[in-house]
Amino acid sequence: MNRENQIDLSQYQVRTDLALESHQMAVEQYGEQIPGVYINEEEIEGIHISRLSIQSEEGAKRINKRKGNYITFEADALKRHDSTFQGQMTKVFANDFQRYLKEIGILEDAKVLVIGLGNWNVTPDALGPLVVEKILVTRHLFELMPNDVNEGFRPVSAVAPGVLGITGIETSDIVKGIVEESKPDLVIAIDALAARSLNRVNSTIQIADTGINPGSGIGNKRKALNRETLGVPVIAIGIPTVVDAVSITSDTMDYLLQHLGKQMDIRNPFGKRPSKNPEIHQHFLGMVGTLGEQEKRQLIYEVLAPLGYNLMVTPKEVDIFIEDMAEILANGLNMALHSAVNEENIASYTN
Amino acid sequence: MNRENQIDLSQYQVRTDLALESHQMAVEQYGEQIPGVYINEEEIEGIHISRLSIQSEEGAKRINKRKGNYITFEADALKRHDSTFQGQMTKVFANDFQRYLKEIGILEDAKVLVIGLGNWNVTPDALGPLVVEKILVTRHLFELMPNDVNEGFRPVSAVAPGVLGITGIETSDIVKGIVEESKPDLVIAIDALAARSLNRVNSTIQIADTGINPGSGIGNKRKALNRETLGVPVIAIGIPTVVDAVSITSDTMDYLLQHLGKQMDIRNPFGKRPSKNPEIHQHFLGMVGTLGEQEKRQLIYEVLAPLGYNLMVTPKEVDIFIEDMAEILANGLNMALHSAVNEENIASYTN
Amino acid sequence: MNRENQIDLSQYQVRTDLALESHQMAVEQYGEQIPGVYINEEEIEGIHISRLSIQSEEGAKRINKRKGNYITFEADALKRHDSTFQGQMTKVFANDFQRYLKEIGILEDAKVLVIGLGNWNVTPDALGPLVVEKILVTRHLFELMPNDVNEGFRPVSAVAPGVLGITGIETSDIVKGIVEESKPDLVIAIDALAARSLNRVNSTIQIADTGINPGSGIGNKRKALNRETLGVPVIAIGIPTVVDAVSITSDTMDYLLQHLGKQMDIRNPFGKRPSKNPEIHQHFLGMVGTLGEQEKRQLIYEVLAPLGYNLMVTPKEVDIFIEDMAEILANGLNMALHSAVNEENIASYTN
Amino acid sequence: MNRENQIDLSQYQVRTDLALESHQMAVEQYGEQIPGVYINEEEIEGIHISRLSIQSEEGAKRINKRKGNYITFEADALKRHDSTFQGQMTKVFANDFQRYLKEIGILEDAKVLVIGLGNWNVTPDALGPLVVEKILVTRHLFELMPNDVNEGFRPVSAVAPGVLGITGIETSDIVKGIVEESKPDLVIAIDALAARSLNRVNSTIQIADTGINPGSGIGNKRKALNRETLGVPVIAIGIPTVVDAVSITSDTMDYLLQHLGKQMDIRNPFGKRPSKNPEIHQHFLGMVGTLGEQEKRQLIYEVLAPLGYNLMVTPKEVDIFIEDMAEILANGLNMALHSAVNEENIASYTN
């Protein structure tokens, strides 16, 4: 297939806000060893935690994510709407996040501003605003009656700044104005993310110390929220809630190849890794099987685009997932930010 | 590919509640002429209207839908959130539905009960309850002060009975109890549907005189609401709001074949219809291209299922689509059911 | 003041759904001893519990409430939005209600239908529907997979039937239809009530075995839900959420008299009970002080009515009160109805 | 009644945010002529419009409102939930507001920031946030594609900053930060108000060019939003949604006196104005009738306060009133701010 007029393949790149997915794709393309990129993984109470550190420009370029540290929590059980497991996830997240704050030098009495990015009128985008509604806010108590605040709390404020289409103002400008007036020592920005794989939707939490581009995952390049723009460290916490239809199709085709290849492997003692064998690809998927990742995505995009649809999709059960995830993040943050809040008393502190 | 243990292919059948999609699939499989099945189509103000009549058991079996009449309104413009076009759609729907009621012998003063099926806590399933909230309810006025009701209205009542998981009672039992006590002459049941094609989601309205199986589109076989169970005619009105991930992938593959085939056709003066040419299929999609519809779906299902996900998806913008569609249906029904309500005064009658 | 045309004083009667308030008014009017009426009181963990039993027709007439048993829980602390006290209230309510069910002969496996009366679009009237949303529904599990339901549960269903203005159908007809189809052994009807005293709003829970007139507290006489109309016992549970402006004014005047009278008492060694002394009334409130209860209310009503206002009011913080009260009732019922649900695991059972 | 320990009567002053009510009280106290205070009134389509101008410090002190101009729209018909009258009100408000902007020198292309004050979780306080949701926001279009914006629009942005208890940050600080970053030429601040009279709730709109103290009406003194603090003119638009129980009682007593006095007047040809005649007061209300306004309020407050209740109340139907009022204000502002938006096309511009 001769595609002469092909100009900008980058727009057909996989849309994902998850560094872990970007890293996996880079590994598939460039191999395991990417200079200046380190990853280690552990398993706690059924939760898979990956710590990815991108320390070189070269690594950032290959992985297509900013230099910095990314922690990813993965647990399929999150989809089960099981309050026991959610409590476990909350605890693991809170402990990990508390340790993380210490490691990056955030003091116990540092003032924290939680920013809930996203559009509260669009359920899959409402994660940030929902978390903000459940955050235990204390900054005003420290301001108005500093002597009456108990031990074990720090000044926390929380704002959901809305999105450009609702306010008419860049989210980053609103946040900047609020940061300048309220002077926090740390900003934590919560956002709904786009994933490549439907499987990761509502089962993955990502923490990044790189700041955030509001709406970046779904193609809207907005001004960044990070240490350069806000003057204080910005930690981004996100959960994928949408995936594009192109990714669903493309990934399923890849899975198909792996699946069919494995079946063949049983009969083939030499066990070639299916996804690396162009002949097998061609055998099963014909010419389409021989396309590179971007070419294949471009092709799928060309097919789906004329159908006139914005192709980001979310599971039918989005309302309950978003509610569950917001509770985990809010409870987790309340426990991590205030040492006086713990598993036992969390219910009385969260709205 | 040898698949010996293959037992029940029917579960991999395309999940669609749209008779039009079922008919198209039957046509692809059995050819244009299906005995006892008639379809005619027209275009009004940018809206494509199909009238499908399934009059034979044979036709019902092939199309896999109950005998009866299905009207389908299609308009991609519905996705544009454009209030002018929505007004147009409302008017066309109202006129058509009013004529339809006359044709099937529903009198001008017949008492109507509107049932909004679905779960109001699940946005893509909340269409029915949202319509019910906006229906102009008048039955109590006829009961309590019959002499004070103006000309041009009929007794209309409206109930959203919830779903089994919320109430613990079969929806059909609740509706049956209400019908027995309130004695309407006609039941109109509104429900969110599942479509095969993502493209049809929130762009298609289906009217059927066959009754409805609450939740049937998404695999939950519940007791039916129809003339046999309720004792009065039941008209079902539905709009697809979800589609399964298997369908997205499968359809995209089909589109791919058509797309690639058309490109080849340009060079091929013989212009064979691509979807009928197994060689072209194999050329482009290899072995997968040679699979039958059900085999292909089964394969995709086998690949996606272990990912542990309920695979019904909805567009990210589901909240606004559902709101728009509910307003069109409610306004349309208010105008169709009450001759005193029209384009000019509809705003003052709808909540 | 000569009021010749005075016809129906009954409409100026105190509007209250609380038997306890009606009883207090009767005591003020007729004295402590009303034949066939018994009351006893206890205090548990800061909650005042009154058990009022109206066993004679004479008592019912004087108190202006149906014959039957009324349990009232009172606790000002309920207004504090204090989750610890709410947990306590829930436990006390659950224990008392469980014992009560036993006393009136409801078996452990009796099937229960919870009806949430009221209009979900009117916050002070949304108590019933909100409780229903939080009820642990199990009836369908017993129907669909009876062998898989754990010990300690019973079949519970829950429906919010809406109000006449929303559905066009009498609430009692909808409930009757559902009862006939789903055949519960007991109906529990939850409703928001009107109180005489603003002080009781959101601090009082009433349980009555007399059934309920939907909307009775605010002047809409609807058909009753009780054993006669439904064929099974009906327990009504209500919480006052509104009070009329006439009551606020009238009561404040009474308080004024008591207050001023007490001040005078300090100087008056004979200590006459102020509310019984017409001279003191006249001294402080002039001619108005000499009016009887109904005359005074009629006067206030005449003054307020031309202002053109529906005079039921609710505290500004109604949203949070309703949410708190709904959670207490729902959690309390979940614990009382299912022995497997208790203080420790309630969080995982309530939505 | 000897009240020696009486310290600060000001706290028993009538709580009202309406300059018109404050003016009426001042007139009752000081007589019609207050130096430097001017009022004129007109009636348009059933809407009473008062223009009050407080130009002297003396006047400001007596009326207890800041120097400035206050426009008040009054219409009891607003309570009727009648969409025709609401359309009329919207048009009158829009025309008046548009003229007003011209008079105070706001240019047609001036950039406007609409601030919706109040707590979206408290229905009677949610007016501002609800208006913001319905404002036609255009600023981002002027920023991102200035050449594509049609004639007849101006840059409008809109933010609901939340309240201190939700964000932990003073509302005025958030607004200041946003103003500094987005640089509007005019701020319009919408807020729910407290009235003295239940009758005015949801029937009165006040426009003031004096800026606003978020939450001032209900006793929370917050930092002001005005030209001094924000650097641009601030127009406050408010609608009373709550009234305190003290006012209800106190006003009803006053009405009682007027009412009884008028009845007496019929027999008394000399027609003394009842509220000015202490003897009549004493005749009807005894000693209480002789109390001054503040003394009477203090007394009522002393009586109600121990009942432990926050005494701000709102009509039971608050949800629908707030929704109606928000739509009137938002539609009115959309028409006043954008000349391209008018009665005919407003429906397609408002969310």
Image (cartoon, coloured by chain):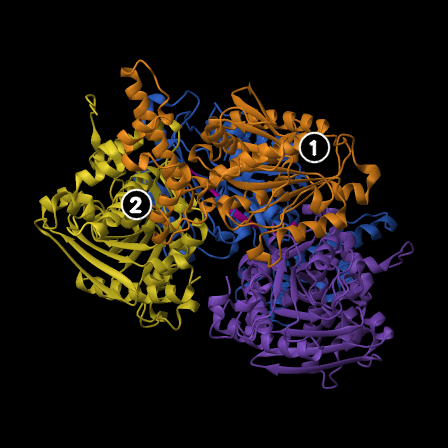
Chain colours: A orange, B yellow, C blue, D purple
- Where, by quadrant of the figure, is residue B221 drawn? top left
Q: Main secondary structure of the magenta part?
A: strand
Tell me which segment is drawn in magenta: C187-198
Query: The numbered mark 1 sits on a residue in which chain?
Result: A
Q: Which mark is residue B177?
A: 2
Q: Which mark is residue D87?
A: none
Query: Which one is in front in this view, the residue at disc 1 or the one at disc 2?
Result: 1
Q: Position of residue D35 (x, y in %)?
A: 85, 80
Quickly name the residue at label 1. Answer: A337
Q: Residue furthest left?
A: B35
Q: Kindly identify the amino acid type of the residue bearing the numbered disc 2.
A: Gly
Instruction: Specify whether B338 is left or right of B58.
Output: right
Answer yes or no: do the residues labelled 1 and 2 have beta carbons within 8 Å?
Answer: no
Q: Secondary structure at mark 2?
A: helix
* Residue C189 sits inside the magenta stretch: yes
User: With respect to residue D40, does C233 lie above or below?
Assistant: above
